[in-house]
Image (cartoon, rainbow, N blue to C red):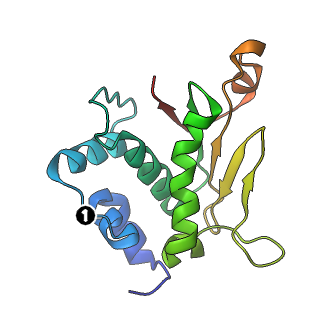
Amino acid sequence: MSRWLTEMMVDDFIHDPVLACECIFGIQQPPHQQLRLWGAWSHPFFFDSSGFGTGKTLTIAIVAALRMMLMQDRVAGSIGNTYEQGMQVYRYFDRWLDTNPIFRNEVRKDWRNRPASTHSSGAAVLKGRNTGSEIRVIPPAFMRDSERVASESWTDGYFEEW
């Protein structure tokens, strides 16, 4: 498969996130994870309280990545109980940047023509190449009343290990 997404592929993938997951990431999910992916993709408030090790973090990463690649002007924010917990989602993006040519191609490039993936103590940010969308993982900063979280403006929110 090409490393480029065509308009027809984008349309198909927006309407079928399971197909997008298989074609873009090469991940064939078992039925229970497909249902979770459909639920997170199609419902504005999706609450997943399934057990430990069932793939919730992977689903968050897939949904956030697909929305960044396929939808215009989205800002996805992800936060966990600790910054390290939130970064569990971002580790999937780092891995896909290294191993997945389609995902890497859909991420904005820096001046050295490498994927513009920002890692800092204040945030980890990944921006879409053509969509104007981005994914932001931020620390919760509970000791400072979560002032940083209050100043963020997201169209999609992902909360890890609520």
User: Which residue type carries mark 1?
Assistant: Gln
Image-quadrant location for residue 84: top right
Nearest to the observer: residue 133 or residue 148:
148
| Quarter where residue 130 is shown | bottom right
The C terminus lies in quadrant: top left
Q: Is residue 25 left or right of residue 78?
A: left
Q: Position of residue 104 (x, y in %)?
A: 58, 72
Determine crowd level at label 1: few under 14, some 14-19, many 20+ residues with C-alpha closer than 10 A. Answer: few
Residue 65: image location, x then y, percent: 50, 56
Residue 9 lies, in percent from the top left, at 38, 74
Residue 90 left/right relative to 162: right
* 31 sits left or right of 19 in the view: left
Q: Which residue is mark 1?
A: 28
Which residue sits at x=52%, y=46%?
89
Query: Residue, x 51% and y 73% (percent of image)?
Result: 99
Residue 80: give x, y in percent of width and height.
55, 30
Work out whether residue 68 can be spotted.
Answer: no
Is residue 34 something that shows in the picture? yes
Query: In the picture shown, does residue 134 fall above or below 123?
Result: below
Q: Is the N terminus in the top left, top right, bottom left or bottom right quadrant?
A: bottom left
